[in-house]
Amino acid sequence: MQRILSRTRLRSGMEAEYERVHAAIPPALVERLRAAGVSNWSIWRDGQDLVHLIEVEDYRAMRRSLADDPVNAAWQDVVNPLLEADDDYSGNDDGVPLVWTLSGQVDR
């Protein structure tokens, strides 16, 4: 299981709308995320900055499987206008690099 940290940024004034659309994402999207190996996805917001913690079997494989998925595309059509930069699920993104963990240090 991978734990991936990712960051996105909201367009100014879109904070409330972003939270509204995330109050309950579409059940079909939940199914696609689960099928792609996502066990959990948490999002924190600090002003316009969003921090995502994604717990997934294989992050790159998840992104590849969702890149052309029509349910995910419909969701991106809702979310991307709220963000400063669109996410088209292309490329080889690995999220924010991990530098250190307490458990990694003390459990050696």
Image (cartoon, grey):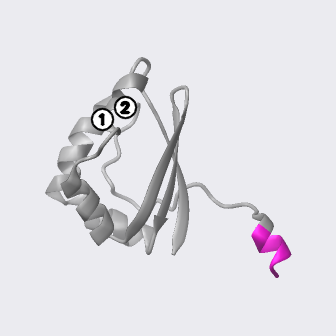
Q: Report which residue position mark 1 lands on.
A: 21
The crowd level at tag 2 (other Cα within 10 Å; few <14, some 14-19, many 20+) is some
Let me know if residue 74 is in the magenta part.
no
Q: Report which residue position mark 2 lands on.
A: 18
Q: What residue type is labelled 1?
A: Val
Pointer 2 with pointer 1, Cβ within 8 A: yes
The crowd level at tag 1 (other Cα within 10 Å; few <14, some 14-19, many 20+) is few
Q: Position of residue 5 (x, y in %)?
A: 56, 55
| Horizontal side, residue 96 vs residue 99: left or right | left
User: Considering the numbered disc 2 on the image, is that residue within a helix, a strand or a loop?
Assistant: helix
Judging depth in this view, the residue of 75 and 84 nearest the camera is 75
Q: Where is residue 19 in the image (x, y as percent from the top left)?
A: 39, 32
The residue segment tinted magenta is: 103-108
Let me know if residue 104 is in the magenta part.
yes
Q: Determine the CA span between mark 2 and mark 1.
A: 5 Å
Which quarter of the figure has residue 3? bottom right
Q: Which residue lies furthest to the bottom in this view?
A: 108
Q: Where is residue 92 in the image (x, y as percent from the top left)?
A: 43, 63
Judging depth in this view, the residue of 96 and 48 nearest the camera is 48
Q: What residue type is labelled 2?
A: Tyr
Q: Which label was assigned to residue 56?
A: none
For image coordinates 39% across by 66% down, the residue present is: 38
